[in-house]
Image (cartoon, rainbow, N blue to C red):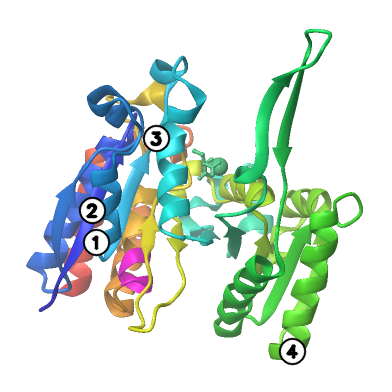
Amino acid sequence: MTAYKLLLLPGDGIGPEVMAQVKTVIGALAETGLATFETETDLVGGSSIDAHGVPLTDAALARADAADAVLLGAVGGPKWSGVAYDIRPEAGLLRLRKDLGLFANLRPAICYPALADASALKRELVEGLDIMIVRELTGGVYFGEPKEITTLPDGTKRAVDTQVYTTGEIERIAHVAFDLARKRSGRVASAEKHNVMKSGVLWKEVVTQVHAEHYSDLALEHVLADNCAMQLVRRPKQYDVLVTDNLFGDVLSDVAAMLTGSLGMLPSASLGAVDDKGSRKALYEPVHGSAPDIAGQDLANPLAMIGSLAMALRYSFGLGEAADLLDGAITDALAAGARTKDIAGEGVNPLGTAGMGEAVVAALRSRVR
Ligand code: IPM
Ligand code: MG
């Protein structure tokens, strides 16, 4: 069997704990003959600042570039709140996204049947929910220049961030969304704010054109991003694929995450363009952050991290069957009552991070048997 090269970047806070569960799952995948990985581990975020003075070294970036895929835990925490803006922990993650060209961020929000009651919304609104948020990840206000704070003559300050998109950037993310929709229900909603933003006007125009030229058999709907946030908590199942820019995607994916019961449930894939050999750069990470308040206490939910490994199997290695088995193992573990504290509900004795990892591995083994 081919041994794929995976770079593990556990990062900060709960990152190392949830990544430890991924290592257990990787061991089980090898044992059961589903997939073999060669893994390397490196630093990112605050842990890299502590060791090297920067949130991502050139050497770590080079390793990420050379790997078949990267798995990242989480970055950031109060410990580094005082470091210079340019070398804050998040800058390491943003550099990985930008320098590896990972423009397409896939954030599936799936409500597992066993968790419908853990959602903040009523069961009937979220049961069976399966949305794919497609977030543009290397453009927009995250990277636009100028991005600065200057001092005005009167001594007060002026801060500028720049929201900028080109036709090409919008076209390529629109293609990703429509291609995914074709394999799903055939419906795409595109969220922007063309009523106040020029970038929104162009976004809507380009998505409309890509649809008309290549995907007129699919259904396209345009929605204002603020209305979209409201619709997500009002009637979330109306959406299938939701394509949007970097900043709106950041916000809307946190909203979608909570529909599924916990931020600890959402995996993500960040993908680059397909090269002439048919491969693409990829980084997989949970949507959740480093949760410093619960770090090191065996409380974190590892399912978003394990789900991110499942996405790697599917999108980087073409191992759809192994990915289905691992996703199925998560479903089984939840159906059998395995819960971490964030999804436990009243009267349930929760498992720790490691206990949940073991529950998934056990479920995987019985699916393979
Ligand atoms: C996310 C996170 C990041 C983002 C932070 C950690 C920089 O919130 O992946 O959603 O804003 O993109
Ligand atoms: Mg976010």
Question: Disc 2 vs disc 4: Cβ atoms closer than 8 Å?
Answer: no
Q: Do residues under tags 1 and 2 come within 8 Å of each other at their CB atoms?
A: yes
* Mark 1 vs ligand 1: CB below 8 Å: no
**Which residue: 30% across, 25% down?**
53
What is the number of the mark on residue 63? 2
Q: From what the image shows, is residue 276 above or below residue 33?
A: below
N-term-proximal mark, 2 vs 4 = 2
Q: CA distance from mark 2 to mark 4?
A: 39 Å
Label 1, secondary structure: give it: helix
**18 and 280: which one is in front?**
280
Q: Residue at x 23, y 41 (%)?
A: 355
Image spot of residue 299 (x, y percent): 33, 31
Whether residue 153 is situated above or below residue 351 in the rendered picture: above
Question: Which segment is the magenta one?
Answer: 311-316
For mark 1, what is the residue?
66
Circle 4 residues within 10 Å: few <14, some 14–19, many ≥20: few
Label 3 Cα neighbours within 10 Å, binned few <14 / some 14-19 / many ≥20: many
Q: Which residue is mark 4?
A: 213
Q: Which residue is mark 3?
A: 75
